Amino acid sequence: MVTLTATVSYLDAQCATPIRIEYSHPNATDCVPSKSAEACVAMSGFPGWYSTSACTSDPKQYGNGIFKTSVSQVVSLSANGACSAEPTSGSHYPFGVCVQTFQTMRRDGYLYNSFRVAEDVEAGTMNWVAFTDNKCQQFAGFEPYGSVHASNCISSGSNVTVINYKGLQLRTLYTGSDCKTKGVLWYASALIDCKPMPCGQNAAFHGATDYFSVSCTSVPDLPTITQETFSTSPHTLKKFYYDSLCQVPKAYFSFRFGYCFLSPSLFPGTASWNSSMDSNGQAEVFSAFASPGCQGPPVLAQNLRFDGTCNAQTRISNFSDGINSITEGLDSTTKSSNPSVGVLTGSIAGGLVFVSVLVALAVWWKKRRSGEKIQQKNPAMEPGLKESWLVAAADTPDLTQNAPVAVVTHSKSA
């Protein structure tokens, strides 16, 4: 049995909060336990990064001791590019969270500084998604990683598995304190043990004053859940994507028309937003307002067609007028159009932090990568795709530091 060296990286000098584990078998030599290696030390050449190391012949069990079984995790193991043999290298990190690299990295022709393994909660599959910035906001590229319920041999020859999978979390927002009328339903991977919560005020999310509840499920039948949630009220089920071609799902939301969401710190100059049908009955209109009650002219607006057209990294996969429900075969074909903002007034610029307003799951883990050839940074690398104001990320504050400018060639073990 091979005994691997497990190197754990941290962004705190106490090595209290693990970010990522690297497994290696240097020179085909088994790891030898050393008390000195277990000490928390600064990583040479990477200011602000620290590491510890240990020996293990069972990477999954070792990682569970580092990240805890209450956390969903991704384990990627390889035996010199083979999935079936006893592993000699690999990596291990939390599932679904933004993982920062400690240096700029290269993969399939693009550079990136952070990544996450993101689940398509309706299909039960996952993608490795890379970003040019260190906060998982500017899309760079992706690779399909297979099912969240199986062990997957990916193209690089690594065997990727999700351990401690927690199912889905459903968060329902209500129109008032009586928690009777539902306005928004948000579907997401439960990255930690999912715990149901009764209806309460939503002040934790960007100062919002709405009320919400949390439920848990392992059955990803989103159209049925949406229909049962909103009943006869007109509503839509939408997919939000990391990329402009709507290939890599990021989040699923269902909205009831007419619901006004209050959020005083959502974006400078806005206090609320709502969803409505356009005058032709062919599209849904998202609008953001300067007033807290969705009153007056919108300062930002976006049209999304009911036919499933990809627009602004978003498309509608199910629409119900309260009586009839229309579901497009969107997974077999991708319709796209150039993103267009319907209304843009005032001095508001940039991207509106919108979709992930509800994402308050901790993103306290980041990432390291070592032992690879340093190269000069490519000055011709184009900036990553900036998310539309509908899809702009709003991950909770994370322990990031600016990564060094060095570039490494990535061997796809992430």
Image (spheres, helix red, strand yellow):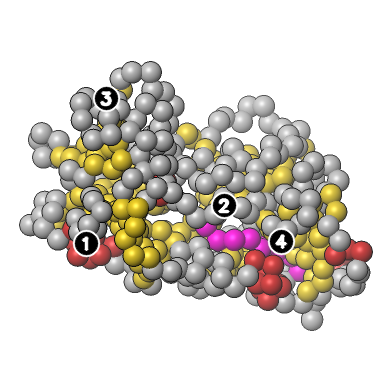
Residue 165 x %, y %: 50, 70
| Mark before the other along the chain sequence, 4 or 2 | 4
The residue labelled by disc 4 is: 21
Foreground residue, 148 or 34?
Answer: 34
The answer to whether the residues at label 3 and label 2 have Cβ atoms under 8 Å apart is no
As rendered, which of 242 and 345 lies closer to the eye? 345
Question: Dot 1, how many residues are within 10 Å of its Cα: few (below 14), some (14-19), or many (20+)?
Answer: some
Tell me if I can see residue 336 in this picture.
Answer: no
Q: Is residue 12 magenta?
A: no
Type of residue at label 2? Answer: Val
Q: Which residues are magenta?
A: 88-96
Callouts 4 and 2 close, C-beta under 8 Å: no
Q: Position of residue 242 (x, y in %)?
A: 44, 44
Q: Residue at x 34, y 57 (%)?
A: 200
Nearer to us: label 4 or label 2: 2
Quick one: label 1 or label 2, which is nearer the N terminus? Answer: 1
Q: Residue at x 31, y 53 (%)?
A: 211
Q: Is residue 94 magenta?
A: yes
Q: Secondary structure at mark 4?
A: strand
Residue 362 image point, x, y percent: 54, 54
Q: Secondary structure at mark 1?
A: helix
Q: What amino acid is at disc 4?
A: Ile
Residue 343, label in figure? 3
Q: Which mark is residue 229?
A: 1
Q: Which residue is mark 2?
A: 363
- The residue furthest bottom is 1
